[in-house]
Amino acid sequence: MYSNGVVYVAGTTIATEYKKYYDVYVLAINSSNGELLWSMAFGTPGTEDTPDDGQAIKVVNNSLYVAGSYGGGKFFLAEINRSSQEFIWARTYGMDTYGEMDLEYIEGGGLVLGGSTASFGAGSADMVVANLYSEDGSIKWVRTLGGGKIDRCNGLTVSPKGYIYAVGQTSNFTEIEYGFNIVVALVSETIEDTLTWLNSTEWSQVQITAPTITVTSIVPETHEHHNNVNTVDPTVSEQTISANTISRNFYIATDNNPPTPIPEPWTIALVVTLSIVLLINYSKLRETKKLS
């Protein structure tokens, strides 16, 4: 995350004070020379199987919002003062994390936290999107989306008008073992209870739930840690890249209505061309009738 000449990074480290435990790791780096400005490590005691992990970071004014998994795999979000590196508040949310997550901010609309969870929903894992108040991390609304298999939210983006798009993967449209397709969902508080999808044999409906999530206030422990800053001289080598042509299958999901496939680019071009030709012929026909 970049802001005013500083790059902010969230990740995971092993703090020296607790060598066998993983902590959330936050770095501030000078974007012009790569100098480390400050760093902090925080978390709860845990094992390698349940690390504390920083997965997303957002800068809003003088605050850093850091999201990730905490204390055994629960969603967490913390607000940190950029100047003093002090916690303003920190919260955990009563649902297990399943893979990556992302964090966005809507001007005047709070924070949006996206990820995957197996705690609620229809399948092994579902996409989950939560709109949170930036003042204290409390929940405005939360929705899960998914079918009978695995669905993941890997990223979020917010349009200039405030529309929330969740981007991820679904295994509900493929018969390949461990195969996934890309999925994009427009998510809002008013989304219907059921989305109907086209050309789905095993997964005729996307189940949407609005679970009640327990929000818990926490006080993370900051731990001593070492920073090893190394200068890397990258080398560039020639690579042979092979490209395969694949068939694109795009589908639209709409509330309670069977959707239609998004046309391929060549189909759109053909329709436009035929429309122009018909319009020209129609104009000529009208001119001929006027002359006669």
Image (cartoon, grey):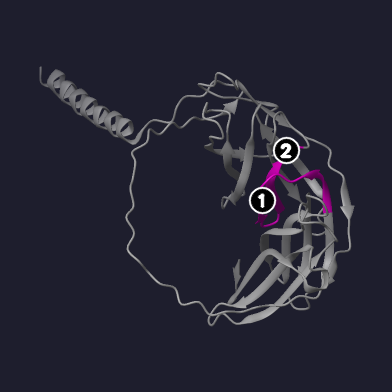
Q: Is residue 235 left or right of residue 266?
A: right
**In the depicted view, which residue is nearer to us: 265 or 34?**
34
Examine the rendered structure and indicate whether residue 286 appears above or below residue 17: above
Q: Which residue is mark 2?
A: 143
What number is the disc on residue 168? Answer: none
The crowd level at tag 2 (other Cα within 10 Å; few <14, some 14-19, many 20+) is many
Say left or right for 110 vs 31: right
* Figure quadrant of residue 107: bottom right
Q: Quadrant of residue 149?
A: top right
Using the image as rendered, state which of residue 215 and residue 269 is in the foreground: 215
Range of magenta residues: 92-118
How far is disc 2 from disc 1 in space, using C-alphas? Answer: 15 Å
Residue beneath label 1, please? 101
> Considering only vertical position in the picture, is 149 above or below 21?
above
| Residue in view at x 80 percent, y 47 percent | 139
Q: Which residue lies most toward the front here?
A: 20
What is the magenta segment's predominant secondary structure? strand
Kindly check if marks 2 and 1 are in contact, taking CB atoms under 8 A apart as contact: no
Residue visible at 67% across and 64% down in the picture: 10
Q: Residue furthest left?
A: 292
Q: Is residue 115 magenta?
A: yes
Measuring from the top left, give residue 115's x and y in whole percent. 68, 46
Taking depth in this image into account, of 190 and 235 the one nearest to the observer is: 235
- Judged from the image, the secondary structure of the residue bearing numbered disc 1 is loop
Amino acid type, residue under disc 2 in the picture: Arg
The percent position of residue 155, horizontal first and vertical second, equals 60, 49
Q: Is residue 74 magenta?
A: no
- Density class for disc 1 (Cα within 10 Å; few <14, some 14-19, many ≥20) is many
- Tell me if 21 is positioned left or right of 287 in this view: right
Residue 216 screen position, x and y as percent: 89, 52
Question: Under tag 2, what secondary structure?
Answer: strand
* Quadrant where the N terminus is found in the figure: bottom right
